[in-house]
Image (tube, rainbow, N blue to C red):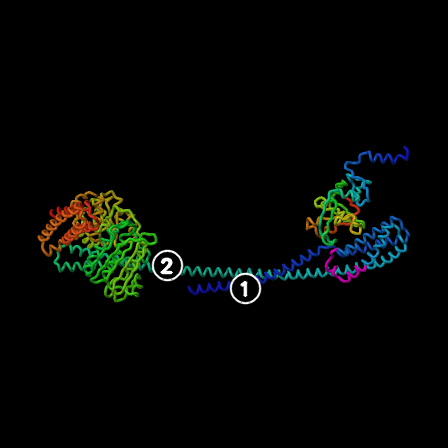
């Protein structure tokens, strides 16, 4: 086969061959989150699930107005729920490793995603978050829904400047 | 007894003192507990407040990011590697540091950390460097061009930054450590306070338990002593009760003892009076009988009072014929009134709204007699009026009796003493007039038991009005008014064969004599055994049975007669006893006795008994009816006239009365036919007067009764029948 046409065939194949059921779209903008797992149902790039901001903001999410130890006064966070991101990636497991830009890692139990409305906030007061402002993603626990969450245990899990999530079996 | 009560009182007082101390202690403890709670809750809220971002951790992160940025920049400069990737990494590092700086600026940390001046100063220095380089990095991002000289200057700045962040980290660590130590100390002090309070609490509880034990013990002791006290009191009460009972028993016995010989005296006197005696002796005998009766009355009064004192004044409510009771009472008292030169007037409605009421006729008569005899006793040559009226008080029909005299009267002081036991208006009264001073007390009790009230109005020297009111509850007319009819002496009695069982020889003679006098055949038995033997072989119409007898008493004898198959198994047996108590009555009933008669018995009572038995028997009732009553008034009148003028004169008197009567009756008939309403009154008055003068009280009463109403044919015919009957009987 002509070596020159191989990429074109591959590209065609990529278009024509059915991707795994419910596979994610390819990210169009800058990738801000990578979900990795030993087995993902809907990977899109190299066996991982990569998301840009637009992809994340189409997922089911929530808006919560609350106080946190790191902000002044009440602020409004919005973004996809952690469980809808994991569902979109088709990730299954018992715990998550949330990794920040500075390589800070926090262990988050899967229950925090399934039983709590924990979100991956993309916006603060409607504006996208820059790295300087704890962006691009911030794991926000529903402090507005449940006051019992307002303690150090959950503060340490509230990772900001998230770049990836590793799902452990 | 009193000292033990005092002791238990002391014990209880001591126990309550301990309780007061304990209460104060408990209050103190409570205050302490409140303080402790407040302290704990304050600490807790401080803890709640302390839920904040960890300052040390943030400072460490800041220091770390500053170092990594410095390191990245240093390597770039050293290797002179200004590739886009490296630059982008550098910018990211700066952004992260920037965000860390913001965290330090904006996050809420521990209070101590936030307010520390050194911290603020050092943070400011760090912030100046970090934010001071913001423009440099903004420019790099915007243009993509990197100026190495500027980077070098930045690197020098960051050298200092790293130095500052390290200083802040060390200082923060020291601050936090100090704070931790302080917090630990605070917890320690809280623990110490808690421990002290807990120890106090334990002490208090121990004290509480001890005091409670002591208190329980003292209360138990007090309880025991009170119990023994109450036992002693009960014993004392029983002793007093026993004494009182003994007194009552003594009074009953004395009453019996006095009444038995009195019975003999009265009976003998009555018998003597029946025989023909010379007038001088007759007067003496009459005096004996009167005095005896007076004595009996006094004894009865005392016994009545004893009963009242024990709260068992027995009252027997049954239909009462008012007119009969009132008239009979007046008849009884009239003689005594005459002796004192008093006139008696009876004011009574012509017709009562309720001619029969539910009450106790015997007690009612007793009260009336008592008040009337008092009135007579304290009045000389005056008028005693008995006024009976029906009235309504508080929606209740009330019968008011007023006994109005024109006697000596009573002053205010005296009025206060009335109705009180053993009291007479003053001592001179008892000397002059006699009496037990119990009469009014008894009257008051009786009236109150009957549901009424009693009172008196009096002016000294002018006379008194004693009054009493009893409820007038209408009753059905009684069919058997044997008891009410006071004039039963007038009726001829049936002849009965009577077994008299009586151990006392004098009483035997008296009772037998009285019975013989009223035409009865008497057989005597001296005790229960003899009575039983006699009753087994012979038939009697009536047995009069004494209660207390030697060998066998009346109860036992009655039981045996009732249980035997002798001819007297069903014969009426009347008990005779001086102990007329309710218990005795019950005993008699149980033994199977027909009736009950308290001793001493007199002629009237015997007549009544014989008559009632005769009525039950009904055998010779007609014979009795043939011999219609003539009345005592007639007998006494005849005796008077005969004594004064002789038998012939009285017969003549009678003949002329009947002549006059027929003339008057004829005229009355005429007046009635002529519709003349005025003359009948005059005619009836004349007839009444004539009848009274020959002692035909019945005729006089009827004439008077006809005067009170408009004359009718029937009424007149009735009067005529009565006159005719008397005429026939007296002629025969």
Q: Position of residue B125 (x, y in %)?
A: 81, 60
Gap in Å between the C-alphas at discs 2 and 1?
A: 43 Å
Magenta span:
B107-125
The outermost residue toward the top is A1
Quadrant for residue B196, please give it: bottom right
* Residue in the picture at 77% in, 43% down: A56
Magenta-drawn stretch contains B114: yes
Circles 2 and 1 on the same subunit:
yes
Q: Is residue A92 visible?
A: no
Dot 2: element: helix
B572 lies above or below B285 = above
What label does residue A63 carry, if any? none
Observer-side mark, 2 or 1, equals 1
Residue B69 vs residue B464: left or right? right
The N terminus of chain B: image quadrant: bottom left
The outermost residue toward the bottom is B428
What label does residue B238 carry, if any? 2
Chief secondary structure of the magenta portion: helix
Residue B156 vs residue B708: left or right? right
What label does residue B21 carry, if any? 1
Quadrant for residue B274, please give it: bottom left
Q: Position of residue A98 (x, y in %)?
A: 77, 47
């Amino acid at each position: 086969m002509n070596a020159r046409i191989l990429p074109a065939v591959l590209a065609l194949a990529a278009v024509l061959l059915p991707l795994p059921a419910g596979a994610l779209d390819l990210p169009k903008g800058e990738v801000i989150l990578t979900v990795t797992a030993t087995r993902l149902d809907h990977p899109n790039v190299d066996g991982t699930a990569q998301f840009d901001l637009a992809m994340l903001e189409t997922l089911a999410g929530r808006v919560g107005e609350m106080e946190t130890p790191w902000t002044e006064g009440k602020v409004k966070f919005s973004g996809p729920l952690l469980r809808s991101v994991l569902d979109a990636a088709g990730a299954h497991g018992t715990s998550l490793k949330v990794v920040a830009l500075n390589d800070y890692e926090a262990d988050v139990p899967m229950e925090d995603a399934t039983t709590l409305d924990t979100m991956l906030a993309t916006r603060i007061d409607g504006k996208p978050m820059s790295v300087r402002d704890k962006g691009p993603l911030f794991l926000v626990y529903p402090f507005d829904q449940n006051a019992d969450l307002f303690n150090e245990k959950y503060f340490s899990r509230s990772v900001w400047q998230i770049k990836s999530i590793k799902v452990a079996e | 007894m009193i000292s033990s009560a005092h002791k238990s009182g002391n014990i209880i007082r001591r126990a309550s003192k301990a309780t007061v101390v304990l209460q104060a202690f408990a209050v103190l403890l409570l205050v302490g507990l409140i303080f402790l709670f407040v302290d704990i809750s304050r600490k807790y809220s401080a803890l709640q407040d302390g839920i904040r971002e960890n300052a040390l951790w943030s400072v460490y992160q800041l220091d770390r990011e500053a170092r990594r940025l410095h390191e990245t920049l240093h390597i770039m400069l050293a290797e002179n590697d200004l590739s886009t990737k490296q630059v982008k990494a550098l910018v990211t590092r700066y952004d992260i540091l920037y965000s860390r700086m913001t965290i330090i600026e904006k996050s809420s940390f521990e209070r101590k950390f936030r307010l520390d001046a050194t911290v603020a100063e050092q943070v400011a220095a760090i912030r100046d460097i970090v934010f001071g380089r913001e423009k440099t990095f903004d420019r790099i991002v915007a243009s993509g061009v990197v100026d190495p000289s500027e980077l070098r200057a930045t690197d020098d700045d960051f050298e200092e930054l790293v130095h500052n962040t390290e200083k802040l980290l060390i200082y923060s660590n020291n601050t936090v450590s100090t704070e931790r130590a302080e917090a630990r100390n605070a917890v320690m002090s809280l623990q110490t306070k808690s421990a002290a309070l807990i120890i106090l609490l334990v002490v208090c509880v121990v004290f509480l338990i001890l005091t409670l034990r002591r208190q329980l013990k003292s209360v138990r002791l007090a309880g025991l002593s009170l119990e023994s006290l109450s036992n002693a009191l009960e014993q004392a009460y029983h002793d007093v009760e026993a004494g009182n009972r003994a007194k009552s028993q003594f009074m009953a016995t004395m009453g019996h003892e006095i009444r038995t010989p009195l019975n003999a005296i009265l009976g003998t006197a009555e018998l003597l009076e029946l025989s023909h005696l010379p007038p001088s002796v007759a007067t003496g005998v009459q005096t004996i009988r009167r005095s005896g009766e007076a004595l009996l009355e006094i004894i009865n009064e005392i016994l009545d009072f004893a009963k009242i004192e024990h709260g068992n004044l027995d009252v027997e409510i049954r239909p009462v014929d008012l007119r009969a009771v009132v008239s009979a009472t007046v008849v009884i008292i009239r003689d005594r009134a005459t002796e004192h030169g008093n006139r008696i007037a009876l004011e009574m409605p012509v017709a009562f709204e309720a001619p029969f009421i539910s009450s106790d006729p015997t007690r009612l008569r007793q009260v009336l007699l008592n008040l009337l005899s008092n009135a007579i006793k304290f009045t000389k040559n005056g008028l005693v009026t008995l006024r009976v009226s029906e009235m309504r008080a508080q929606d209740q029909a009330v019968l008011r009796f007023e006994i109005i005299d024109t006697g000596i009267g009573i002053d205010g002081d005296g009025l206060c003493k009335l109705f009180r036991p053993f009291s007479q208006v003053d001592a001179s009264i008892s000397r002059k007039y006699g009496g037990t001073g119990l009469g009014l007390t008894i009257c008051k009790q009786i009236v109150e038991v009957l549901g009424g009230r009693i009172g008196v109005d009096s002016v000294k020297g002018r006379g008194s009005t004693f009054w009493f009111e009893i409820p007038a509850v209408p009753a059905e007319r009684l069919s058997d008014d044997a008891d009410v009819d006071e004039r039963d002496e007038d009726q001829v009695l049936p002849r009965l064969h009577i077994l008299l069982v009586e151990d006392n020889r004098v009483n035997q003679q008296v009772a037998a004599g009285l019975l013989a006098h009223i035409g009865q055949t008497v057989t005597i038995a001296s005790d229960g055994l003899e009575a039983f033997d006699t009753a087994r072989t012979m038939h009697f119409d009536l047995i009069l049975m004494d209660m207390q007898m030697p060998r066998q008493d009346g109860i036992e004898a009655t039981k045996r007669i009732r249980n035997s198959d002798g001819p007297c198994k069903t014969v009426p047996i009347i008990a005779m006893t001086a102990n007329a108590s309710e218990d005795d009555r019950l005993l008699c009933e149980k033994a199977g006795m027909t009736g009950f008669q308290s001793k001493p018995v007199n002629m009237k009572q015997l007549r009544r008994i014989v008559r009632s038995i005769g009525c039950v028997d009904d055998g010779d009732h007609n014979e009795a009816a043939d011999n219609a009553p003539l009345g005592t008034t007639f007998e006494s009148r005849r005796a008077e006239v005969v004594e004064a003028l002789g038998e012939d004169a009285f017969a003549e008197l009678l003949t002329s009365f009947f002549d006059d009567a027929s003339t008057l009756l004829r005229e009355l008939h005429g007046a009635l036919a002529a519709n003349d309403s005025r003359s009948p009154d005059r005619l009836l008055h004349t007839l009444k007067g004539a009848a009274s003068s020959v002692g035909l009280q019945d005729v006089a009463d009827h004439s008077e009764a006809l005067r009170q109403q408009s004359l009718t044919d029937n009424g007149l015919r009735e009067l005529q029948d009565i006159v005719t009957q008397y005429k026939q009987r007296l002629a025969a």
